Amino acid sequence: MREAAFIKQNKEKWLDFEKAIFTNNFKNPDELASLYIQLMNDLSFAQTYYAKSKTIIYLNNLAAKAFQKIYKTKREDKNRFVHFFKTEIPLLMHEYRRYVLYAFLVFGLFVTIGVVSAMNDDSFVRLILGDNYVNMTLENIEKGDPAAVYKGGSHFGTFFGITFNNLRVGIYNFFLGIFGGIGTGFVMFKNGIMLGSFQYFFYEQGVFWESVRAIWIHGSMEIFAIVIEGAAGFMLGASILFPKTYSRKISFVRGLRDGFKILISTMPFTIAAGFLEGFITRYYNTMPNWGSVTIILVTLSAISYYYLIYPHIVKRKFNAQYGII
């Protein structure tokens, strides 16, 4: 059978199956299992007769999503919380990994713009950070404590205030993606410009290392989480603009659901960053260099591993377990 005839013969079945997976439109688990078997038969046929076809990629991805649906209630995954962070989020991060790349590139561009603008315009930092903040920081630098701003307020007050604000930013970062990703881009722009100009300001004042030791104790997870939330926002925007084989409604529901899950996954890191800022960062200039560097490296490694490396490990194990290529 020619590939075109094979696709024409089964296309409607595949699209119905695809739609049913994302709307949970199954009468019972046996129906899902039966349709899955048919799908695997089609995949095997395609692998045999159309080895280099894109049809195999499509069917393989559809089979993977079906497996997730069938096996998400397996015995070892009775703990929904554990399954969510151990398996579900890593698989989503692998599926949407290109949006993570886009988010890092966009955020990096905005940080660079912030640095270059601060380098070429002496008033830019004051425009972005405000005169009061700049004047206060200059006074702190003269006193030999550049990041003294982090010592203000109580431990718990700072922790709750900062954490609430960062969670709010993350929520805006995701949900504003509903405007085709433009809203998310604006949040990324605002934070990227601020970070770039902020760090250049300390560099210009000759206290860059001191600022790094303080800011990135909590900033490693805080900034990384903003980027991941931005990726979720871009996913939401893309689900509206580029529905692919789905109807626009189903694509939007899928993007909203998957993006919201990723947003939820960043919250423990955001809370941890708030804790570090409230309880640890204020001691940056009294702890040894190795102490602050260790905290920065450990926090950055942990969140990088979870979102960038671990998803590939989980995906390989998933494919190997269920015979998916």
Image: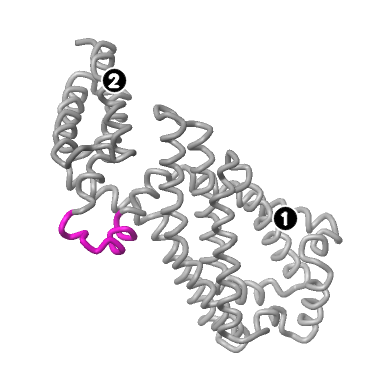
Quadrant of res 253:
top left
- Closer to the camera, 285 or 128? 128
Residue 95 x %, y %: 38, 43
**Predominant SS of the magenta segment:** helix
Q: Nearer the viewer, mark 1 or mark 2?
A: 2
SS for callout 1: helix
Q: Contact, CB < 8 Å: mark 1 with mark 2? A: no
| Label ID, residue 114 | 1
For label 2, the crowd category at 10 Å Cα-Cα, with few meaning under 14, some 14 to 19 and many 20 or more, is: few
- Closer to the camera, 248 or 307? 248
SS for callout 2: helix
Residue at image point 70% right, 79% down: 149
| Label ID, residue 50 | none
Answer left or right for 324 relative to 162. left
Residue of label 2: 11
Count of numbered badges drawn on the protein: 2
Quadrant of res 12:
top left
- Closer to the camera, 277 or 241? 241
Marks 1 and 2 sit apart, C-alpha to C-alpha, by: 49 Å
Residue at image point 61% right, 51% down: 107
Residue at image point 21% right, 61% down: 78
Q: Amino acid at mark 2?
A: Lys
Q: Amino acid at mark 1?
A: Gly
Residue 167 x %, y %: 54, 64
Answer left or right for 172 relative to 50. right
Q: Answer above or below: position of 27 versus 120.
A: above
Membership of 75 in magenta stretch: yes
The residue range painted magenta reads 74-87
Q: Answer above or below: position of 294 versus 308.
A: below
